[in-house]
Amino acid sequence: MKKIFIALTVFIALAGCKRNIDNVDPKNPSVAPASALFTNAQRTLASTVTSSNVNLNIFRLISQYWTETTYTDESNYDLNTRNIPQNLWNTMYRDVLRDFQESKNLVRTQVTEANTRNTDTAIIDIMQVYSWYYLVTTFGNIPYSEALDINRTAPKYDDQHAIYLDLLARLNKDIAALNNTGATSSLGNADIIYNGNIAKWKRFANSFKVKMGMTIADSDPALSRTTVETAVASGVFTSMSDNANFNFLSAPPNTNPVWVDLVQSGRKDFVAASTIVNRMVALNDPRIPLYFTTNSSGTGYSGGTPGASSNYATFSKPSTRLTEPDFPATLLSYSEIEFFLAEAAQRGYNVGGTAAQHYNNAVTASIEEWGGTESQAATYLSQPQVAYDPVNWKQRIGEQKWISLYNRGWDAWIEQRRLDFPQLTAPATALSAYPRRFIYPVNEQNLNRVNYEQAAAAIGGDLVTTKLFWDVL
C-alpha cells in the first residue's frame, strides 16, 4: 500500500514538471487510474466493517462484545438520533460501491490485454458482491439495479431475494472468469488484500460463495446445498494463510480504525461487555487475554452490563493488540469457513469431513489466528461445554462462532440472527427489541419517498423487528 501512495506522489510530481502544451492542467488529471480507485474502495470497505465509530458501526455493541461508559444510546439500539443507518448506507454506496464501479469502468478502457482486463473486472466485481451482501443482509430491499447510476436521483428498490440471487449469479460468473487459463491481473500491489494473486482470489470467491450459500440454508435449502457443494469442489480456504486481511499502516492516515477511535482520539467510551466476558471466563477460553485487558483488580476479567453506564477504570477493555495502529482488518477467514462447513456437514451437504472435524478445525484456527496455540485449542475443545454437540449443533456452532468473530461485529450480528445463538438479551433500557434489521435512512424517507414507502410495505414494515427473507426461524 505504501508503494502505491509513493508511486502516485511521484507521478503527480513528474506531471507537474511538464509544460502545459495541450491546454490540460497536469496537476488536476481528469481521469484517475483504475487501480487507485480500487485501492481506495478496498481501504474504505475494510475501515467500515472494522470501525468502532458509534456514528457508523455499532455492531460490537449490538453483539454485546463491548458496552459504553457514559453515552449509552447505541448500546440501547438507538438507530435514529445519530443517523447510524444513513451514515452506513452513504459510506457503502458512495465511497465503496461507487469507487469499485468507477474502477471497473476505467479498467475497460485502461487495460488493453483482454485476459487481464477480464480478470481485473472479475476481482473488482467480487469486491462489489461482497459489499452488496452486507447492505442487503442489513436493510432488506435496497436500491440495486439503478443505484449506481448518477442520473437516477431516486432509484427504485429491488426485491432482496432477487438481489441475492443476482449476486450469486455474478459471483459464479466472476469465478468462471478467474478460471480462464492464462489469466493475469494488472492490479498488483494496488490490491492490498491479495496483491493481485489470482489463485488467492479464486479461493476467496469460492469461500465467500460458501458464506452466501449458508446464509440461505433455512430459507432455500436446495439452493444452499448446490451453492456450497460447487464452491467446495472448486476450492475454498484450507489454512489461515488464505485469510482475506487488509493490512493497515502504523502511521496515519491509513491506520486501523479501532486505534483511531480508541487510542488516537484519547476517548474512553468502551469497556468489555459482561455477556462475552462471563461466557469466556466460564469456558476457560484461552482467547480472553488476547481479546481483553484485565480489570481493575489486575488479575481477572469483568465486563459492564450492556446498555448501562460503566466505569471505564473498573472493567476490562479491548486488548492492546486489537488497538495497535497496524492491526489488520479481516474480511473473511479460514476459521469462519470451517464453521460454515461444520454446519453444512451437519445438514448433510457433501463437503468432505464430518461436522465435528470442521468444528474442531474452526475453533482451533480461531485460537491460533489470535495468537493462541494448538495445545490450548485441544485443551479447550476437550471440555464438555465446548466439544461438538450434534444434538444442539446450532447452539454450539452459534456460540463458538460468536466468540470467534469478536473483531467482526457486523458478521457476528448476521450470524446471530441466522442461527439464533447465542440468545442475547436486550438491555433493560433498550429503546427497541433486538434489531433484526436496520431501518432505512432518513434521507431515503425524505428524498426518495415513493420508492421508500413501496420498499417498506414490501418487506413488512420499516421496523427493526422485521425479519429479512433469509431469517426465517
Image (tube, rainbow, N blue to C red):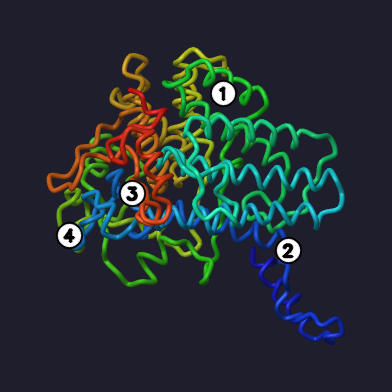
| Gap in angstroms between the C-alphas marked 2 and 4 | 50 Å
- Disc 2 versus disc 4: nearer the observer: 2
Q: Earlier in the sequence, mark 1 or mark 3?
A: 3
Name the amino acid type tagged 1: Val
- Disc 4 versus disc 1: nearer the observer: 1
> Which label sits on residue 329?
none
Circles 2 and 4 in contact, beta carbons < 8 Å? no
- Say which residue label 3 marks: 60
| Gap in angstroms between the C-alphas marked 1 and 2 | 36 Å
Q: Earlier in the sequence, mark 2 or mark 4?
A: 2
Name the amino acid type tagged 3: Arg
Instruction: Pick whichever, 444 or 85, lies toward us.
Output: 444
Whole-percent x, y for residue 361 in the image: 49, 29
Name the amino acid type tagged 2: Pro
The quarter in which the C terminus is drawn is top left
The quarter in which the N terminus is drawn is bottom right
Circles 1 and 2 in contact, beta carbons < 8 Å? no
- Disc 3 versus disc 2: nearer the observer: 2
Query: Dot 4, how many residues are within 10 Å of its Cα: few (below 14), some (14-19), or many (20+)?
Result: some
Residue depicted at 64% across the width and 52% down the height: 101
Query: Dot 2, how many residues are within 10 Å of its Cα: few (below 14), some (14-19), or many (20+)?
Result: some
Secondary structure under badge 4?
loop
Query: Dot 3, how many residues are within 10 Å of its Cα: few (below 14), some (14-19), or many (20+)?
Result: many
- Say which residue label 2 marks: 33
> Which label sits on residue 314?
4
Secondary structure under badge 2?
loop
Left or right: 394, with 44 as reference point: left
The quadrant holding residue 111 is bottom right
Name the amino acid type tagged 4: Thr
Secondary structure under badge 3?
helix
Residue depicted at 39% across the width and 37% down the height: 414
| Gap in angstroms between the C-alphas marked 3 and 2 | 35 Å
